[in-house]
Image: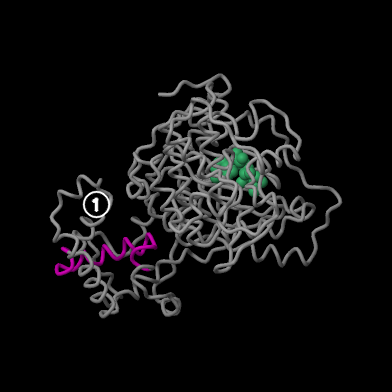
């Protein structure tokens, strides 16, 4: 276990401490006594119209949506002729995340039967129109989301437009981070487009390596993004404030691999992240990381490039500084900077404690070769060099093989990406649940409203676009994780048939 330096303050886990609540994982503790009322589903007769509008596609209904997946399984289990299909699906799931060595020991006929099975199940279910009752329970209740849906605990950090707080959904007891954007600050800083962009990008994502957006809503004074809570601190804190400068090799590889998966997800959706730096990579309770702060991310239209000098100066790629058009290349540069900094305990173009003016930083990034001390082993050095290629056309990750080129570099030889993506790899470092991994937040000034900024009718139009409430997949995950689904699911334990349904 890691030693904790004095910079980290301890909070005892008493039931009166906010951290006590933060540490109550799943299991449904912390639910309001009125939780069933808060989550009451509409009666099925009220859902028939909605059911007609839902897409009936196997992947979206029975794989991607967490509640859909559960209902589908319950349904199959209730039919003797389908039960074996579910057990085969389970076996296939287990097979997917086996190591290569274990895979070689499985009989080959196994893999041929898998395609048949899913088609089989699918045809059966679809033909029997059994999905109608299944689909209607997928949407979160159409109840407006307000601040009364949550309990507020301690402050977690501060951003450009407001504070970030630990929140708990009253109905389920699940903990979240709420990033508040103060309306007057947003208006004064002309941050409307940026805030809406961040919200709209976040709600389309679904990756264990990027923070998820579970709710977006407004209060009188702020716009709120309710996100995956990340209690383990950011990578900047872990690189510099844990007593040593830099991280051990296994941690560097692990974090780089998870970031790489996060970038892969974003890039598949044509999103460039553009703000990769240790501060924006956050750890959760178990030591997994997620990419956060997507304010600068942008979606490219198919095959197009963008231009724009955005990012944080020390981490900007040469093509960004040089005002050129670019695609995903700045993110691979960013990964190079990150691996360098995690290894050396300093960023590639700035010495420890060195103060630099912007122009000199830009010159170094565009012209100077970064140096590698003997703390770098050969693979890490080679990996960073390829990512920190000043010419994006020759940079690792930007050639034909794209992200696969990055993942297959010898730097990652110990990482099994399939297992990593399935979330079954144990992180090399687990944060101490009693510690707070950040500088004392008490020192941070409170956000107050900016005087002299008046909110008008035109601002309302923007708030309406922002205020869309719960997001389906994270909401379903919350219901399952916290045990609400199990108790509210009317289909009974063995998928038994409710009286008014025609299965
Ligand atoms: P900004 O876009 O204004 O920079 P951030 O999204 O970076 O805001 O959030 C500001 C700070 O709040 C972060 O540096 C971090 O300390 C904290 N924070 C942000 N998101 C989370 C989260 N999901 N979990 C825990 N803390 C967070
Ligand atoms: Mg930030
Ligand atoms: Mg931001």
Span shown in magenta? 61-84
Count the marks: how many?
A: 1
Dominant SS in magenta: helix
Q: Quick one: quadrant of the N terminus? A: top left
x, y percent for residue 375:
49, 26
Tell me if residue 437 can be seen.
no
> Residue 71 sits in which quadrant?
bottom left
Q: Quick one: quadrant of the C terminus? A: bottom left
x, y percent for residue 2:
44, 23
Classify residue 296 as left or right of residue 177: right
Q: Quadrant of ligand 2?
A: top right
Residue under pointer 1: 94
Q: Residue at x 53, y 51 (%)?
A: 394
Is residue 272 shown above or below 353? below
User: Residue 200 versus residue 261: which sits nearer the camera?
Assistant: 261
Classify residue 143 as left or right of residue 30: right
Tell me if residue 477 can be seen.
yes
Classify residue 12 as left or right of residue 76: right
x, y percent for residue 479:
41, 55
**Badge 1, how many Cα within 10 Å: few under 14, some, many 20+?**
few
User: Residue 255 versus residue 391: which sits nearer the camera?
Assistant: 391
Query: Residue pushed farthest right?
Result: 452
The magenta stretch spans residue 238: no
User: Residue 118 versus residue 445: which sits nearer the camera?
Assistant: 118
The magenta stretch spans residue 69: yes
Query: Residue pushed farthest top?
Result: 6
> Residue 85 sits in which quadrant?
bottom left
């Amino acid at each position: 276990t890691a030693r904790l330096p004095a910079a980290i303050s301890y909070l005892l886990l008493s039931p009166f401490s906010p951290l006590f609540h933060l540490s109550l994982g799943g299991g449904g503790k912390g639910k309001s006594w009125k939780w069933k009322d808060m989550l009451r589903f509409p009666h099925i007769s009220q859902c028939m119209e909605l059911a007609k509008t839902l897409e009936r596609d196997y992947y979206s209904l029975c794989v991607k949506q967490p509640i859909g997946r559960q209902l589908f399984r319950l349904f199959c289990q209730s039919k003797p002729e389908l039960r074996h299909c579910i057990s085969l699906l389970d076996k296939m799931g287990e097979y997917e995340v086996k190591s290569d060595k274990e895979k070689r020991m499985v009989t080959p006929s196994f893999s041929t039967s898998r395609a048949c099975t899913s088609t089989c199940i699918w045809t059966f279910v679809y033909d029997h129109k059994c999905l109608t009752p299944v689909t209607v329970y997928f949407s979160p209740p159409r109840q407006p989301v307000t601040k009364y849906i949550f309990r507020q605990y301690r402050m977690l950090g501060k951003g450009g437009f407001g504070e970030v707080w630990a929140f708990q959904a009253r109905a389920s007891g699940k903990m979240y981070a709420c990033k508040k954007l103060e309306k007057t600050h947003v208006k004064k800083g002309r941050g409307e487009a940026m805030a809406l962009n961040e919200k709209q990008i976040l709600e389309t994502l679904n990756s264990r390596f990027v923070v998820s957006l579970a709710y977006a809503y407004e209060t009188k004074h702020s716009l709120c993004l309710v996100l995956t809570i990340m209690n383990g601190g950011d990578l900047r804190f872990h690189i510099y404030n844990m007593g040593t400068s830099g991280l051990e090799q296994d941690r560097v590889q692990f974090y780089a691999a998870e970031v790489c998966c996060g970038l892969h997800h974003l890039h598949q959706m044509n999103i460039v992240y553009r703000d990769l730096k240790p501060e924006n990579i956050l750890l959760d309770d178990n030591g997994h990381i997620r990419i956060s702060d997507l304010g600068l991310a942008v979606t490219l239209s198919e095959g197009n490039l963008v231009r724009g000098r955005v990012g944080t100066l020390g981490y900007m790629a040469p093509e960004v500084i040089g005002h050129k058009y670019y695609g995903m290349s700045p993110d691979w540069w960013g990964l190079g900077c990150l691996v360098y900094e995690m290894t050396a305990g300093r960023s590639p173009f700035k010495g420890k404690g060195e103060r630099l003016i912007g122009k000199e930083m830009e010159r170094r990034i565009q012209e100077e070769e970064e140096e590698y001390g003997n703390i770098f082993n050969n693979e890490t050095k080679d990996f960073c060099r390829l990512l920190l290629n000043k010419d994006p056309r020759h940079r690792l990750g930007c050639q034909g093989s794209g992200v696969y080129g990055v993942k297959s570099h010898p730097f990652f030889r110990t990482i099994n990406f399939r297992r990593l993506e399935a979330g079954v790899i144990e992180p090399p470092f687990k944060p101490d649940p009693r510690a707070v991994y950040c500088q004392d937040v008490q020192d941070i000034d409170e956000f107050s409203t900016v005087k002299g900024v008046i909110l008008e009718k035109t601002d309302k139009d923007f708030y309406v676009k922002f205020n869309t409430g719960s997001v389906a997949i994270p909401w379903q995950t919350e219901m399952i994780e916290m045990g609400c689904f199990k108790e509210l699911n009317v289909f009974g334990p063995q998928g038994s048939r409710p009286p008014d349904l025609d299965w």
